[in-house]
Amino acid sequence: MNVNFEYYKIFYYVAKYNNFTKAAHVLNNSQPNITRAMNCLEHELNCTLFVRTNRGVCLTPEGERLFTRVSAAMTQLQLAEEELSDSVRLEHGSISIGASETALNIYLLEHLKKFHIAYPGVRLKICNHSTPQAIRSVRSGEIDFAVVTTPTQLDAPLKELKLKSFQEILIGGKTFTSLTTQKFFLKDLIKYPFICLGLETATYHFYYNLFLSHGIELIPDTEAATTDQILPLVKNELGLAFLPEEMAKEALQRQDIVQISLKDKVPKRHVCMVYDSKRPMSIAAQKLKKILLEEKKL
């Protein structure tokens, strides 16, 4: 049976008001058109839906059964329209983001604050991931997008948008103060205990390859689970470590740690957004993406 769905909408309003004229007024239509539509619906369903009375119409038993179903469908459609309307205005909705610790600290947090102030009704779910974990979550559709640090090593349809460049510096605890009077090659660092993130992180792979390019193998003496753990480990004299300059700035100013200069150049890295180019984003996720891209710092 291929019934025009517009007939069901008209049926709903006629049954709701028990009157063809009132239904026509609500639907901004004419009474003859409403009557014609209901005649067509009754013909296609091969049953009588309304009994005409002096005061309007009333439903037949068949009409009552149909109205129960159509009313439920109309309620769901109206709720869907309201939800979409709220979503367009960003009064509701949710965004799921995968974020590495470094990206969260040096870029994402300040932009999430701005977004939350503008759209407090949107729920934010932040998943703490290493870069490889976040990329896997984007690929599987578990999150809307990821904000992570390079290197990313992506395959289509995933894409990367660079948001901010940052420089990492070599730091140590106070017991390494004597090292601040000279510059070192990377190969010189093998004489000292070294702290680095775990094997599953982009940071580890970045420094492993950097050290390898200078003819040495990176074997950390201490592996940290997150970037936030590195500074306390350094302060407590467990070894030297690389840390984004802005994350080390306050501790350097307080002289809790020292910076050690290098002769070898450490390339800049980037905070970037990773997303699936073939999966459409929600309106809320699109708005946050726009905010992140508007304030790129490359």
Image (spheres, rainbow, N blue to C red):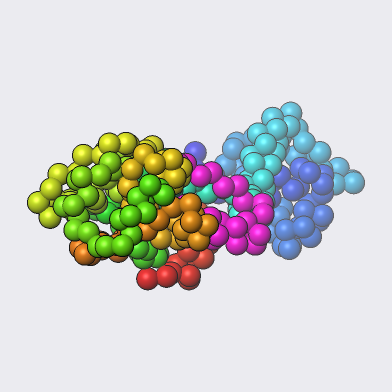
User: For residue 44, which quarter of the picture?
Assistant: top right
Q: Measuring 37% from the left and 54% from the top, which residue is drawn there?
A: 177
* Magenta stretch in the rendered image: 103-129
136 in the magenta segment = no
Most distant residue in the right direction:
55
- Judging depth in this view, the residue of 70 and 259 nearest the camera is 259
- Judging depth in this view, the residue of 39 and 74 nearest the camera is 74
The answer to whether residue 44 is left or right of residue 71 is left
The answer to whether residue 212 is left or right of residue 43 is left
- Judging depth in this view, the residue of 40 and 12 nearest the camera is 12
Q: Measuring 76% from the left and 42% from the top, which residue is drawn there?
A: 15
The answer to whether residue 93 is left or right of residue 28 is left
Residue 149: image location, x then y, percent: 35, 54
Does the rendering let one see residue 15?
yes
Q: Measuring 77% from the left and 53% from the top, which residue is drawn there?
A: 23
Does the rendering let one see residue 272?
no
Residue 105: image location, x then y, percent: 48, 53
Total marks shown come to: 0
Q: Quadrant of the C terminus?
A: bottom left
124 in the magenta segment = yes
Q: Measuring 72% from the left and 58% from the top, which residue is drawn there?
A: 27
Residue 280: image location, x then y, percent: 42, 54
Residue 120: image location, x then y, percent: 67, 54
Most distant residue in the left direction:
215
